[in-house]
Amino acid sequence: MIDRTVGYRVMSFLDAFSGYHQIWMAKEDEEKIAFITDYDTYYYKVMPFGHKNAGATYQRMIDAVFKNQRGRNLEAYIDDILVKSKTLTEHLGDLRETLDTLRRYNLKLNPAKCTFGAVSGKFLEYLVSVREIEANPNKISAIQSMPSPKTAKEIQKLAGRINSLGKFISKAGDRCSSFFRCLCNNKKGQWDGECEAAFIKLKKYLTSAPVLVAPKEGSILSLYLGVSNTAVSVVLLDNEKEVQHPIFYTSHILLDTESRYPTLEKLALAFLMTARKLRPYFKSHTIQVVTDQPLLKIWHTPKVSGRLLKWSVKLGEYDIRFIPRTTIKAQALADFIAKFSMTEPPPTKTLADLWSLHVDGASGSQSQGAGILLTSPMGATLHQAVTLQFKATNNQAEYEALIAGLNFALSMAIKRIQVFSDSLLVVNQVNQTFETKDEVLKKYLKLARSLISLFENFSLTHIPREESQVADRLAKEGHPDLHRTQVFERPSFECTEVSSEKQPPCRMDEILNYLKSGTQPNNRRET
């Protein structure tokens, strides 16, 4: 509704008199809302304030009264009415039409709260004008003039004021996470030095809060994602005339379980929550996600996580595109783009698009399995565990880990990869340094080499066990998320067949190309 007020040069702001009292109660319902005083029992003849459905009833009345004007030359929410026009001449006619409608239904206005013929003004706690949407100065000054909170109640009041300005605050979750931590049970509202520093920075930021714009119909909107250890943040942008203007900022403070998600899943979570909150934008515009992370490949890889598959289904109804991040064109974005904080040190990178894969197998009396740790060129990690339900030696388990890791990488269309394993035997057999004599290991080696041939760049390096602790833990203990645990009932070479024959073109090829790389057919109808 606020976006629909942008682009109009002349506006009048009207306020209904006495609000709910302008709706008369039905005669048979008057006694149902009776109340007792010290002197007598009374009942309302008009709809009183305080009833649960009073607001919804009043809004239905407003919608019915202005059904021919809403969206065309008028916007109304409860008792706030905005008449909008392109020119002053049109505005006089629109205002006459509105007043005639009010007179017809016997609705009255409060002249003390009405403003006529303005170029800008406050509507629903926002400052709207012909080109932009600004935060309410009164709300900003309420925070800037507020002293440092001392009690939990005062911190809650500050949190409420910040929430009302949330769409204007870049990375609000990161800026205000210390305030919300103060309200946890262990701190009980204790205001410390970290909170005071964050409060001062917030006041400084609000002195120049960004101005938002409303997108034009049919325009392509850009979406930037940011992630930290405590919160995920998103900014939606309009690319009018190749200049980026913010439309909406949103942020989400991570719960304890969400904070343990891999970085890519945190980004996917931010994307999903934004789609839920900004559904009207997603339904009416093409959303262009600008990121340097392989979200598109992760999105269409069911093996990664069950929750990712569920999220991708929910987002399937929207028109979403993924493009790599390039030069930042808006000053508002310079403060937004967050650095990725990793809990595990990223491996040494030799190529810009080189992925890293750590694999480890374990075979013992208690458990048999394999662990996989896949790391993107930017340092984001993906975990997967494999449970072996057949009897296997330790060397066979190491091969199962290698083959499962290679299949995992190929399912994400990865072409350049460096693999690390703590099994000296497997590394040297694959690198043709050792001769393979065991018949079972020969079958494993044949399958591994057939998978390796599908990569453009591949290397396998031996590392000490101490440098593969994550994969080793996954192999021995499995993954707490069962959706990221595969179960093998038979050896891989018995259920996997790799064919090098070139298959004839198929109508599914275009669908597979889109799922892997986002490439769409040239024919728009086929798309």
Image: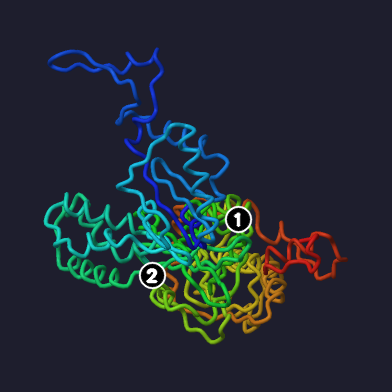
* Image mark for residue 210: 2
- Marks 2 and 1, Cα distance to the nearest angstrom? 24 Å
At 37% from the left and 30% from the top, the residue drawn is 22
Residue 188 appears in the rendering = no
Residue positioned most to the bottom: 350
Q: Are marks 2 and 1 in contact (CB under 8 Å)?
A: no
Q: Is residue 359 above or below residue 260?
A: below
Q: Tell me which label, 2 or 1, sits earlier in the chain.
A: 2
> Residue 142 location, x and y as percent?
22, 59
Looking at numbered disc 1 in the image, what kind of residue is underneath it?
Ser
* Of 214 and 408, the residue lying toward us: 214
At 35% from the left and 36% from the top, the residue drawn is 19
* Of 149 and 106, the residue lying toward us: 106
> Residue 296 location, x and y as percent?
60, 65
* Of 403 and 257, the residue lying toward us: 257
Classify mark 2: residues with Cα within 10 Å, few (<14), some (14-19) or many (20+): many
At 26% from the left and 55% from the top, the residue drawn is 159
Q: Is residue 53 above or below residue 500?
A: above
Looking at numbered disc 2 in the image, what kind of residue is underneath it?
Pro
* Image mark for residue 457: none
Q: Is residue 285 above or below residue 106?
A: below
> Residue 186 location, x and y as percent?
18, 52
